Image (cartoon, rainbow, N blue to C red):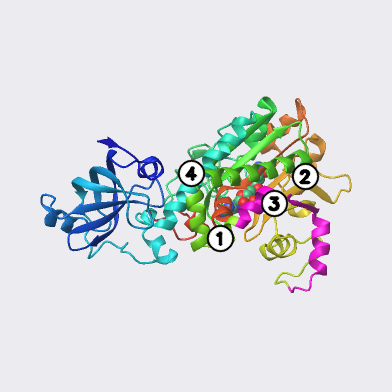
Amino acid sequence: MTLRRIVEILRTGQPDDAVTIRGWVRTKRELKDFTFVDVNDGSSLTGLQVVLNKDLPSYADIIAQINTGAAVEVSGQLVASLGKGQRIEMQGQTITVHGGADPETYPLQKKRHSFEFLRTIGHLRSRTNTLGAVFRVRNACANAIHQFFQERGFMWVHTPLITASDCEGAGELFAVTNLDLQNVPKTKSGDVDYGQDFFGRPAYLTVSGQLEAEIMAMAFSNVYTFGPTFRAENSNTSRHLAEFWMVEPEMAFCNLDGNMDLAEQFLKYLFQRVLDQCLEDMEFFNQRISDTVLSNADAIINSQFERITYTEAIALLEKSDRTFEYPVSWGLDLQSEHERYLAEELFKRPVIVTDYPVEIKAFYMRLSDDGKTVRAMDVLAPGIGEIIGGSQREERLDILEQRIQAQGMPLEDLWWYRDLRRYGTVEHAGFGLGFERLVQFMTGMANIRDVIPFPRSPLNAEF
Ligand code: 4AD
Ligand code: MG
């Protein structure tokens, strides 16, 4: 008997193969002379159907233990299946029940549960069809991200999670401290005495690895980060998490056009890879979650993204006969409703909006000659809104320093960032892709909390 993963058996298993599988029981159907057991080991959406005949030793005893949720190991012969819905099934010969699951209390009985309910059992929900499919897609997508960059000679760089700088300047930082919060040391003037804190200064969880990625790009040309980032924004929406994963490429000798091209190629590549690897899961999403999942993937792969400037976007929004909650005028930051109108209704495909007003964007974005806009780009996706934010960076020291000061940030803290403009500065650009927003976009899942195994959001850090 060879131990095999169920996905592999379903793909290549042949009648008479003697195999062992290990997994969890999804359903059991008892008939007069035999019992059907659907076993799933997480390797695919579809499980393996195991048939147990009533002449097996201790049949009644075993059947009584094989309830939904039980961990089992089954050995037997593969046989061609007569039932519809599967090519092959297993005639079970020996069964070990490693751990049972009491049907009176196990919460995942065979019925549809709401995603809200499943969030309350975060330790068990990965055993459901939908969450299982989401996390397989998530895995395939993460792998494809590394492949995309590695094939193109980008170096994966590891940027810190604990940092002293606020990259986005939005003040959405979680503090990291080991001061005794019951007895915070104070200076003579009554401020917190960070000199006594672990790092001897205020420190935070990072909101973005970009500033450190820029350091590495100035040595390795093309780099990327892929890791967790943290934002203490108190937004209880279906698109925000307090802890999310971000992918951030950074390229030296590159301007905004190169940046847009990379972002577009990147998304096309990821969709193609995930379709190749997880077709069954993607078909499931199309059938059960949103019937535009496959057509959307096709459109991403095969159509060119629209590219417009912020100024053009504002004109289009002003021309539309829609009334928006946030009235549109030049200078306003685009809200989710505007982004979705552009991507979903007007263009019906991803839109890259560039050249935003300097006032609404971060200090590091390159100022254009008009003095009013910066070389920013946001990629807006139908159904989601912004999934990528990026820019060409300000490589000129004097202008960068003016921007830092204009935002009221202390110049000294960014001495090392300014040094990059002093020694070997060159035009460079990069972007950040919100990994969970991408997985949402791919799968059609409505809530971002259902595309990460253990979501962190306001008042929620269980599991
Ligand atoms: O647009 P953002 O804030 O850009 C940056 O952080 C840049 N430093 C990136 C760069 O140029 N290297 O964030 C990038 C992306 C957003 O487009 C969005 O997809 C995602 O990160 N994002 C979030 N995803 C989930 N929850 C949140 N609270 C998010 N905030 C941003
Ligand atoms: Mg942004």
Closer mark to the observer between disc 4 and disc 3: 4
Q: Amino acid at mark 2?
A: Arg
In this rendering, position of residue 62 left or right of residue 232: left
Dot 4 or dot 3, earlier in sequence? 4
Q: Any atom of ligand 1 within 8 Å of the CB at mark 1? A: no
What residue is disc 4 on? Answer: 139
| Pointer 3 local density, CA inside 10 Å: few below 14, some 14–19, many at least 20 | many
Q: Which residues are magenta?
A: 295-323
Please name the residue shown 47% across and 54% down the image: 456
Dot 3 or dot 1, earlier in sequence? 1
CA–CA distance between discs 2 and 3? 24 Å
Report whether residue 401 is seen: no
What residue is disc 1 on? Answer: 234
CA–CA distance between discs 3 and 1? 23 Å
Closer mark to the observer between disc 1 and disc 2: 1
Q: Which mark is residue 379?
A: 3
Dot 4 or dot 1, earlier in sequence? 4
CA–CA distance between discs 1 and 2? 27 Å
Secondary structure at badge 2 equals helix
Q: Amino acid at mark 3?
A: Val
What residue is disc 2 on? Answer: 403
CA–CA distance between discs 4 and 1? 28 Å
